[in-house]
Image (cartoon, helix red, strand yellow):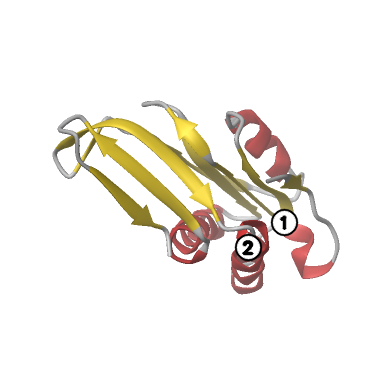
C-alpha cells in the first residue's frame, strides 16, 4: 500500500490518499487540507473500539484489495464533483490494530462550513460503503467475524 498526493483539475481537491500499515496522524490529514481559501474544515477520525454489538473485542485487523487506492480515489473524485470543496484527504490503516488506534481519518475543507461537513460525511460514508477494505474482529468470547466495507 502507499500514499499518494494529487493535484490538477477537479481532482486537484484530492490532497492525500493513503492506505498504510503505519499509524495515522490527524495532524498530517489536517495539514493536507489546509488552504487559505477554506473557511471551514471538517474532520472524522475512526478509532478501534473495545466492544462491538455488546461483545468485547480482543483483536482487530484490516485487509484491503489491491485496487483499494483506485477505488478510494474514485470515491473522492465523486465527492469533489458533487460538493464544492477546496481539499479532501483520506487515510486508512491496514494490518493489526490495537484498541484505541486510529483506523481511518478523512477531512474536507471548503469555503463554507456546511459544505465541509457535507463532504466529510459523504467521504467517510462512501468510503465505508464502496472501498474494498475488510475488518476481521476477534472477540474475547473466542468468536470472530469479518465485516466487509463493501
The location of residue 4, given as percent across then percent down, is 76, 49
- The correct choice, above or below, for 137 with respect to 11 in the image is above
- Verify CB contact (< 8 Å) between mark 2 and mark 1: yes
Q: Tell me, for residue 14, which label it has, or none.
A: 1
- The correct choice, above or below, for 117 with respect to 96 in the image is below
Residue sitting at 59 percent across and 66 percent down? 75
Q: Total of numbered circles in the picture?
A: 2
Q: Tell me, for residue 28, which label it has, or none.
A: none
Residue sitting at 17 percent across and 45 percent down? 53
| Occupied quadrant, residue 71 | bottom right
**Element on which disc 2 rests:** helix
| Residue at the far right in the pictured view | 8
Residue sitting at 20 percent across and 29 percent down? 140
Crowd around label 1: few <14 · some 14–19 · many ≥20 (10 Å)? many
What residue is pinned by disc 2?
Answer: 76
> Residue 47 versus residue 66: which sits nearer the camera?
66
40 sits to left or right of 125: right
Q: Earlier in the sequence, mark 2 or mark 1?
A: 1
The location of residue 81, given as percent across then percent down, is 66, 73
The location of residue 78, given as percent across then percent down, is 61, 71
Location of the C terminus by quadrant is: bottom left
Amino acid at each position: 500500500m502507499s500514499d499518494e498526493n494529487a493535484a490538477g483539475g477537479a481532482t486537484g481537491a484530492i490532497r492525500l490518499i493513503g492506505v498504510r500499515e503505519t499509524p495515522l496522524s490527524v495532524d498530517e490529514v489536517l495539514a493536507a487540507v489546509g488552504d487559505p481559501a477554506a473557511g471551514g474544515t471538517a474532520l472524522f477520525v475512526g478509532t478501534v473500539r473495545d466492544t462491538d454489538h455488546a461483545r468485547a473485542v480482543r483483536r482487530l485487523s484490516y485487509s484491503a484489495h489491491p485496487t483499494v487506492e483506485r477505488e478510494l480515489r474514485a470515491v473522492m473524485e465523486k465527492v469533489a464533483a458533487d460538493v464544492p470543496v477546496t481539499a479532501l484527504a483520506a487515510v486508512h490503516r491496514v494490518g493489526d490494530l490495537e484498541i484505541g488506534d486510529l483506523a481511518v481519518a478523512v477531512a474536507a475543507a471548503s469555503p463554507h462550513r456546511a459544505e465541509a461537513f457535507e463532504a466529510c460525511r459523504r467521504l467517510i460514508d462512501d468510503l465505508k460503503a464502496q472501498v474494498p477494505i475488510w475488518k476481521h474482529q476477534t472477540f474475547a468470547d473466542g468468536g470472530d467475524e469479518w465485516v466487509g466495507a463493501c
